Amino acid sequence: MKVPPPLSKFVEIFSALPGIGPRQAIRLAFFFVEQGVAFENEVAKTILALKGIKTCRQCFYIHQNESGLCNICSDKNRNQNLIAIVEKETDLMSIENIGQFSGRYLILGDLKKTGVLETGQKLRLNSLKDWIRKEQDGKIEEIIVALNPSLQGELMTNLIAEEFKGLTGKISRLGRGIPSGGEIEFADEETLGSALKRRE
Amino acid sequence: MKVPPPLSKFVEIFSALPGIGPRQAIRLAFFFVEQGVAFENEVAKTILALKGIKTCRQCFYIHQNESGLCNICSDKNRNQNLIAIVEKETDLMSIENIGQFSGRYLILGDLKKTGVLETGQKLRLNSLKDWIRKEQDGKIEEIIVALNPSLQGELMTNLIAEEFKGLTGKISRLGRGIPSGGEIEFADEETLGSALKRRE
C-alpha cells in the first residue's frame, strides 16, 4: 500500500538510524502525525539544538568548549600518562561514573564485525600516537584497552596492543571475573577460568 | 556523569517515543552528533515535512487531500455498508495489502492494558455511530472488529459489539486458526479449537 512521500521519506531516514527497523520507523511516523505539528516542531528543534555539540579533537568525546577539547581533556589534573581506549561514548561515561579513573580517554568508535580497524579508527589511533610522540616524549606509562570482552574486542585489543608497542610502558585490559550479583553456576568457562586465575 | 543540556533534552524527548528507551535515546544522540550538522538538518527537515500529512476525519487514517478524507474514504467504489474497525494504521495497511477487502475502516488507536475504551476511542466510535445514523439511515450491513486476538482484543471486541447493537446487521471478527506455515504441534488450545470448529 502506498504511503504519502513525506511518510516514506521519514521511514527511509529513521529506519537507517541505529537500532530502529522499518516497522518501528513506520510506527514512529504515525506517532508523529498523531501528535501533531507542535510536537513535530519540538522534536525538530531538539535535533537542531545538537548542532552546538562538538567532538573533542583529542579523545572524540562530546563537548561545547571553544578550545576544541572536552572537559576531561582540558582538565589539567587528569593523568596524561594513562589512557583508556574505549569503544563508545557510553563506555567512557560508565567508567567516569565510578570516579576511580584519573587518566584520559580515546573513543575508538563502534567495532565492526569484520575484525579489522576502519579508516576512521586508524586515524584516531594515529592521532593518539602522534600525541604521545610530540607531547609525551614518545612514551606514556599505560594504555588500558577497555573494550568489551567479546571475540571482536579480543581481536581489536591484540591489534591495538601491537600498534602501541614502544609507545607505552604497559598495555592492560579490564579484569575478567564473575560480575557482582552474577552466579557461578551460569558463568561461562572462560569467565570462571579468569575469575579463578585472578582471585584476590 | 553530566552531559550538555542539548543532549539531555534530546534524550528526554526521544526516550518518550514509542519503543525507544533511555539507552537507545543516548545512543541516537551520540550518533546524530557524530553524523554532523548536515545529517541533523536532514532529519529535522524530514520530521517537519510530516506537517503536510493529516488524519482522515472519517476513519483517522493519514492523507494529504484537501477534502479532509483519506483516499479510501473518498473512493466511491468502496462498500459503505462494510466497516472494519482496526487498532492501528499498520493493521489497515496489512488488510489493504491483501486487496480482498472492499469496505472502509475505522482506526481505533492503541488498545490500552486497562481493558476500557479511552476518551479518544469513544469519540471515534461515536463518530462512526453518527455517520451510520445520518448517512446510512441508521444501519449498515456489517462491522468487522479486526482487533488482535489477545485478551485485550477480546474484551474490546465485546465492548464494541455491544456499542453497535442495532446499528449493524452483523458484527464479525477475523477467523481464528492455524496460520500458514504454522505447526499444529505448537498451536495453543484455543487456536486449535477454533481451527477445528471452523474447518473448511
Image: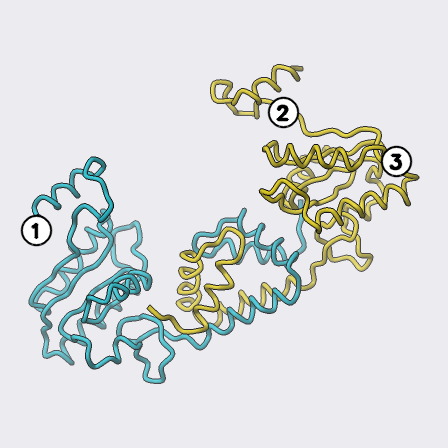
Chain colours: A yellow, B cyan
Q: Which amino acid does label 2 sit on?
A: Arg
**Chain assignment, label 1:** B
- Mark 1, other Cα within 10 Å: few <14 / some 14–19 / many ≥20: few
Q: Which amino acid does label 1 sit on?
A: Glu
Secondary structure state at the residue bearing disc 1: loop
Q: Badge 1 is on which residue?
A: B200
- Mark 2, other Cα within 10 Å: few <14 / some 14–19 / many ≥20: some
**Chain assignment, label 3:** A
Residue drawn where x is 22% and y is 64% of the image? B85
Task: Name the image quarter holding residue A148.
Answer: top right
Labels in figure, total? 3
Q: Which of marks 3 and 1 is in front?
A: 1
Secondary structure state at the residue bearing disc 2: loop
Q: Which of marks 2 and 1 is in front?
A: 1
Disc number for residue A176: 2
Q: Are marks 3 and 1 in contact (CB under 8 Å)?
A: no
Disc number for residue A139: 3
- The answer for how far apart the CA atoms under marks 3 and 2 are is 27 Å
Q: Residue furthest right?
A: A137
Residue drawn where x is 11% and y is 67% of the image? B142
Relative depth, front residue between B188 and A150:
A150
**Chain assignment, label 2:** A
* In the image, residue A166 above or below residue B165: above
Task: Name the image quarter holding residue B72.
Answer: bottom left
Q: Do labels 3 and 2 share a chain?
A: yes
